[in-house]
Amino acid sequence: MLFSQVIGQSKIKSRLISSVKAERIPHAQLFHGPEGCGSLVLAIAYAQYICCENKSDSDSCGICHSCRKFEKLVHPDLHFAYPVNTSKDISKDPVSDDYIALWREQILSNPYFRSSQWYNFIGIENKQGLISKNESESIIRKLNLKSFESEYKILIIWLPEKMNATASNMLLKLIEEPPEKTIFLLVSEEPQQVLLTIASRTQPIKLDRLSNSEIKEALQSGYEVHADVAASIARLSNGSFIAALENLEKSEEQSFNFSQFTTIMRLSYMRNIPEINNWVDEMSGIGRERLKSFFNYALRIIRENFILNLNNPEIVYLSIEEEQFSEKFHPYINGRNIMAISEEINAASNDIERNANAKIVLFDMALKIVKLIRK
C-alpha cells in the first residue's frame, strides 16, 4: 500500500514520512479517527514506507523486494491482529492467523470497510469479534523472534478496543518493553475504549474526516464515476469513504426510491386517487425488503425537507436531483405535518415488517398523506 493510494490525510502522511527520515519512529502509535477516514490503510502504507528499500521523500518505491511483498501483504516482518470468533470452519480458540487469507483478500479488494462487513466476510454470523488471550500469546511468540528480512518487525492491531482484559494485560508489558526494532501500530475506531494503560503508552495519530473534494476525486479516479454523481455521493457521505462506497452501491436503488417518492408526493398533492391506486399496485409487488428500503428513504427525504423549511440548508444532505425536487417541495413539509407524515410512514414500515397486506398498507398510508400534505 503506497501513501499515494491513501485518500487524503496529506498532513499526517508528511508527519509519518518525517519520522522515518529523522529515524525517530515511535515504537507504539495509535491511529484513530472517524469511520471511513482510512486509518487502517494509512497504517499499512506507513509500515510499507518504513520497510521500503528505496524510499523517496514522499512515498515507498513500490518495486523493491519489500514493496512487492507488501503489495500482497505477505511480508514476513509484517504481522496483523484483528478481532475474530469461531465460525463453521474454525470451531475452537480462533486467532488472526486462522483468517489471514480472508484478511488479505478483504484488504486487497477493498481496504475501506466496517467491522460488521469483516465479521460477515469471515462468517462468524451474529457473534462479536474479539482479540483474545490466545491472540496475545501468538503475538508474543511472533515478536520475540528476530526479523526475517527488514530492519523492523511491525505489528498492526486493528480495533484494539476489542481486546479483552486478559489479552490487553498480556500485551502491556510487551508494549512497555518491546523487543528491539519492533513497532506497534494500533488502529482504533473507539480509542476511548482501548485499555488506558495501553493507550497511554502510545503516540496518538488523529485522522480527520475526508473532504468532499477528496472523496469525489477518489470516486472519479478509482471507480470511474461521473463528476456530478461523485460530487453528490461525496456530499452525502459525511467525510467517510466507507459511506461513499455504500452510497455508490445504492445509487440504482436510490434512483428507484427517488422516482417512487416524487410520484406519490405529487399524486398526493393533486389528490389523484385513481393514479395513487395504480402506484399502490406497482409498489405492492416489489417485495418486503425493497418496501422497507423505500420507507427509510422517504423518512430521510421528509426530514431533510423539514430542515430546508427551517432555513438550515448547510446541514441538509441531498443529491442534486433531490435538491431540485426539494426546491418546490420543502414548503409542504413543516411543523404542522412533519410528525404526522413521519408517523404514517413509520407505521407502514412496521406493518410491512409484520407481513401485513402491502396493498392495504400502502393505500392507507397514501390516503393519509393526501390529507396531510396541504397542511
Image (cartoon, grey):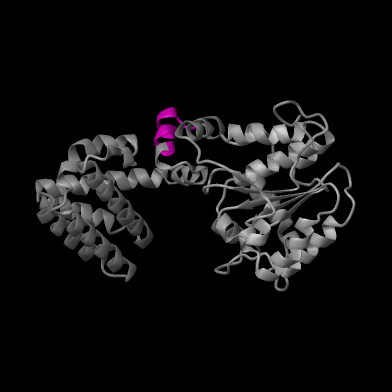
Residue 238 location in percent, x, y? Answer: 43, 43
Magenta region, mostly helix, strand or loop?
Answer: helix
Mark yes or no: residue 114 visible: yes
Q: Please determine whether, in this image, residue 277 is positioned above or below residue 169.
A: above
Near-viewer residue (362 or 42):
42
**Which residue is drawn at the image coordinates 68% and 51% (left, top)?**
202
Q: Please determine whether, in this image, residue 173 is positioned above or below residue 236.
A: below
Mark yes or no: residue 122 visible: no
Q: Is residue 14 left or right of residue 337?
A: right
Near-viewer residue (293 or 54):
54
Question: In the image, is residue 231 part of the stretch drawn in magenta?
Answer: yes
Q: Which residues are magenta?
A: 225-234
Q: Please determine whether, in this image, residue 364 is positioned above or below residue 300.
A: below
Quadrant containing the N terminus is: top right
**Which residue is drawn at the image coordinates 54% and 43% (left, top)?**
37
Residue 163 location in percent, x, y? Answer: 65, 64
Question: In the image, is residue 205 part of the stretch drawn in magenta?
Answer: no
**Which residue is drawn at the image coordinates 75% and 39% (left, top)?**
48
Residue 177 location in percent, x, y? Answer: 81, 56
